[in-house]
Image (cartoon, helix red, strand yellow):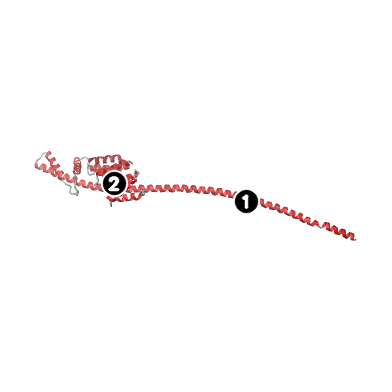
Amino acid sequence: MKHDRLADRHSRTALRPLPLAGALMLALAVSAADAAGGQRNQDRMLAEIRAIQAQLSQLTESQTTLVEAVNALLRERGDEIRTERQERAETRNTLDRLERDVSTLSEAFTQTNRRLSELMAEVQSLQEAQERALLAAVASGDDGSSAAESADVAAEAQQPAESGADASEGDSDAVAAASADALLGGPSISDMFLEARADYVQGRYELAFSGFEQVAASGSELADNARYFMGEVLLAQEEPEAALEQFEIVTEDFRESPLAADAWYKRGVVLKQLGHESDAREIFEDILEVFPGTQAARLARRELDALPEPG
């Protein structure tokens, strides 16, 4: 009996560790399963990270492409803006130049028309004096040569009542020559000038220059006008150096001419066009001092404002 109980005790003692081993094995199995699951989770996370990295790489490339496209558009737009600004500046300069030219021509035409009216009055007075002299010669029974001498004397003595100014000996000769041409039926100096001016307005620059040149060579009262418009014709033909010479003749040889201020202004404009900005600045400043209140002074002030400040 004792022997059986002892055997049972030993048997239970020997069998007691078996549940613990099973638990350990189960724990190991669970751990292995968890490890396998963790590995799968880790692999899945790594795969997701790689996918995210690939997406980030694509986004970076797309962003770089987009930035390059935006920069290209900005550069293109910048070039367009600069071109538009240049075109606007050129248009503004062209309009200003046209405005100045129209203003100068308008004043020159007004002065020319006034002087032509004075010349026509002088011619009329000379014609009347010659007619009176011829009638007096016929009435006194003189021969033709005496009549001609009487007419010449009367023409030289007759002063135009409407001119209101003293004429020089050379101007009187020019007026007499113009009246003689008119009496003989040939073109007068004033007709030549008007024809040359018409050629200039209509763009026939070669004919205009030739006509103005003949008027200038005549030494008449229109010589200063002719020289001035010779300069305008040369400017229209894009010959600024030659034009500058004509404007200089007006300012030097015809200092009392109504066109002197305009000729000085044109000298400054041409010098600026030729790149001599300091010389142009001096001329524009002199115009403000010598010809204040004139259209040339107003245009000179505008040119001075447009010139860069001297360094």
Residue 250 lies left or right of residue 74; in this view the side is left
Which residue is more in the foreground, 221 or 11? Answer: 11
Where is residue 111? Give x, y as percent: 25, 48
Where is residue 72? Give x, y as percent: 49, 47
Which quadrant of the figure has residue 173?
A: top left
Task: Look at mark 2 in the image and give the residue it sits on.
Answer: 264
Which residue is more in the foreground, 275 or 47? Answer: 275
Q: What element carries label 2?
A: helix
Which residue is more in the foreground, 2 or 183? Answer: 2
Task: Look at mark 1 in the image and give the residue it sits on.
Answer: 49
Residue 242 lies left or right of residue 165; in this view the side is right
Which residue is more in the foreground, 169 or 267? Answer: 267
At horizontal 89% and vertical 61% (from top left) the residue drawn is 2
At horizontal 26% and vertical 40% (from top left) the residue drawn is 213
Q: Quarter of the image containing the N terminus?
A: bottom right
What's under tag 1, amino acid-wise? Ile
Inspect this view and state whether residue 199 appears: no
206 w.r.t. 37: above or below: above
**Residue 88: which numbered mark, if any?**
none
Q: How many marks?
A: 2
Residue 244 lies left or right of residue 26; in this view the side is left
Where is residue 58? Give x, y as percent: 57, 48
Where is residue 126? Give x, y as percent: 17, 44
What's under tag 2, amino acid-wise? Trp
At horizontal 66% and vertical 52% (from top left) the residue drawn is 42
Inspect this view and state whether residue 27 appears: yes
